[in-house]
Amino acid sequence: MSKVKHRHSKSRGRKRRTHYKAEAPSTSRCQQCGKAKQSHHVCPYCGYYGGTQVKYIETIEERKARREEKQRKP
Ligand SMILES: [Zn+2]
C-alpha cells in the first residue's frame, strides 16, 4: 500500500471543491393541472402521476377542519 506523501494545503483542497455544486432538480409540467413539478414525481398540487390519481390532496379548508376536529377530542 502506498501512502500519501504530502498533505495538501487548505487552498488546494478548497480550489478542488469549487467544482462540487448542487444542481437544481429538473422540472416538468403536470399533465393534469399544468403546474411545474419535479420530473418522475407525483404532482404535489393535484396528486396525479402519469394521468392517474395516486394520492389524494386535501384542500386548505379540509385540512383546517380536520385539525380543528383533532383539537376538540382531547
Ligand atoms: Zn398536477
Image (cartoon, grey):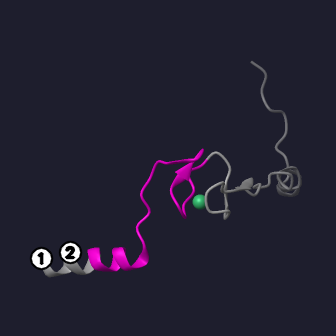
Ligand 1, what quadrant?
bottom right
Residue 47 in the magenta stretch? The answer is yes
User: Horizontal placement of 16 versus 45: left or right?
Assistant: right
Q: List the residue tagged with mark 1.
A: 73
- Badge 1, how many Cα within 10 Å: few under 14, some, many 20+? few
User: Horizontal placement of 55 versus 19: left or right?
Assistant: left
- Residue occupying the point 73% across, 56% down: 27
Residue 39 in the magenta stretch? The answer is no
Q: Secondary structure at mark 2?
A: helix
Between residues 1 and 41, which one lies in front from this camera angle?
41
Contact, mark 2 vs mark 1 (Cβ under 8 Å): yes
Against 44, residue 2 (above or below) is above
Amino acid type at circle 1 is Lys
Q: Position of residue 41 (x, y in %)?
A: 59, 49
Q: Which residues are magenta?
A: 41-66
Which quadrant holds residue 18? bottom right
- How far apart marks 2 and 1 lie (CA) works out to 6 Å
Q: List the residue tagged with mark 2.
A: 70
- Badge 2, how many Cα within 10 Å: few under 14, some, many 20+? few
Question: Which quadrant of the rendered structure holds the N terminus?
Answer: top right
Between residues 74 and 8, which one lies in front from this camera angle?
74
Residue 54, numbered label: none
Q: Position of residue 28 (x, y in %)?
A: 73, 55
Which quadrant holds residue 69? bottom left
